[in-house]
Image: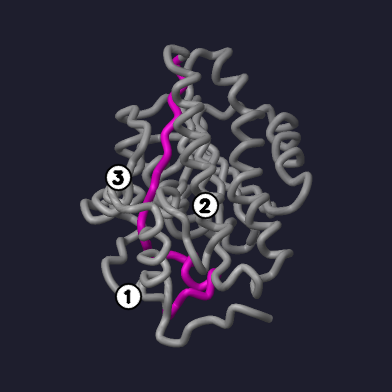
Amino acid sequence: MASPSKTVLITGASSGIGYELAKLFARDGYDLVLVARSRTTLEAVAKELYQIHAKNVKPIAIDLSESGSVDMLITDLQERKIHIDILVNNAGFGVYGFFTATSAQAERAMIELNMGAVTHLSKALLPGMLTRGEGKILNVASTAAFQPGPLMAVYYATKAYVLSFSEALSNELRGTGVNVCVLCPGPTRSGFMKRAAMERSRLFCFGVMNAAVVARIGYQGLMAGKTVIIPGFKNGLLAFGVRFMPRKLVPYLVRMMQGTRAQPSPAT
């Protein structure tokens, strides 16, 4: 069981992997700070976790894709005198379609959330962890991080950043008592598919993992001090298999998997 003084902050905590991770941390006695966009959904999740597991749950409704939102969150934590022992950067979303046809506004928000929030929250919360000589960061990337992704070019690039950033940071912090892990799930049942408008993508037609299973594997890997965590044998095989394929072939294979029976238009 965790010490009552240990607090975990989870972004994107109202559904999917973030919600399942929150349940696991609550079960083991951690205090929770849950961050998501929807206040109504977040408060319902907080109430559920408080009643069933957690001793202390603080929901904070904020959209981390908006400029200045991370600073607002950090200020809120400081005013409440909340010290974060474990940071879970889970919030993220994807944009599907040809780059020439997708929304620039949506992609800017995605870049800010998938990369900016991960970076800025880590920067803000790491000093406290280092001062205390202990702490953990779990960044949620994707198997998309291991190759380029036609029809989701920017999303795949953001997840490659999260993987690279996490591995580098893990090395820098070796011996400090602070561990950095990166979780790289494949297709998972969550709200991601609907928000990215990928309901008909071949990628989600087979081999989709349950969010609770992915969260459990990620949680166990985090507690074991692993650096890169890839849930599922098939996902691990695909992630590492692309390293041995001709570089020019990889985008063609990814596009075939990303495609649908009705292909998106390459132009607006």
Quarter holding the C terminus? bottom right
**x, y percent for residue 84:** 57, 29
Does the magenta portion include 170?
no
Residue 186 among those drawn in magenta: yes
**Residue type, numbered disc 3:** Ile
Q: Residue 213 at what x, y percent from top left?
A: 29, 54
Name the residue carrying label 2: 13
- Between the residue at mark 1 and the residue at mark 2, the CA separation in whole angstroms equals 25 Å
Q: For the residues labelled 1 and 2, say whether their Cβ atoms are less than 8 Å apart.
A: no
Q: Residues within 10 Å of mark 3 (few under 14, many from 20)?
A: some
Residue extending furthest toward the bottom: 262
Decide: is 128 above or below 14.
above
Is residue 46 among the parts visible in the rendering? no
Instruction: Give, as a single range, the part of the protein colored magenta.
Output: 177-200
Mark 1: amino acid: Cys
Which SS class for mark 2?
A: loop
Residue at 46%, 47% in the rendered image: 141
Q: In the rendered structure, which disc, 2 or 3, sits on the residue that comes first in sequence?
A: 2
Q: Is 194 left or right of 70, judged from the image as shown?
A: left
Q: Is residue 200 left or right of residue 71?
A: left
Q: Nearer the viewer, mark 1 or mark 3?
A: 1
Considering only order in the chain, which callout, 3 or 1, is on the residue closer to the N terminus?
1
Circle 1 — which element? loop
Residue that badge 1 annotates: 205
Q: Crowdedness of circle 2 by 10 Å Cα count: few (<14), some, many (20+)?
A: many
Closer to viewer: mark 1 or mark 2: 1
Residue matched to label 3: 217
Q: Quadrant of the N terminus?
A: top left
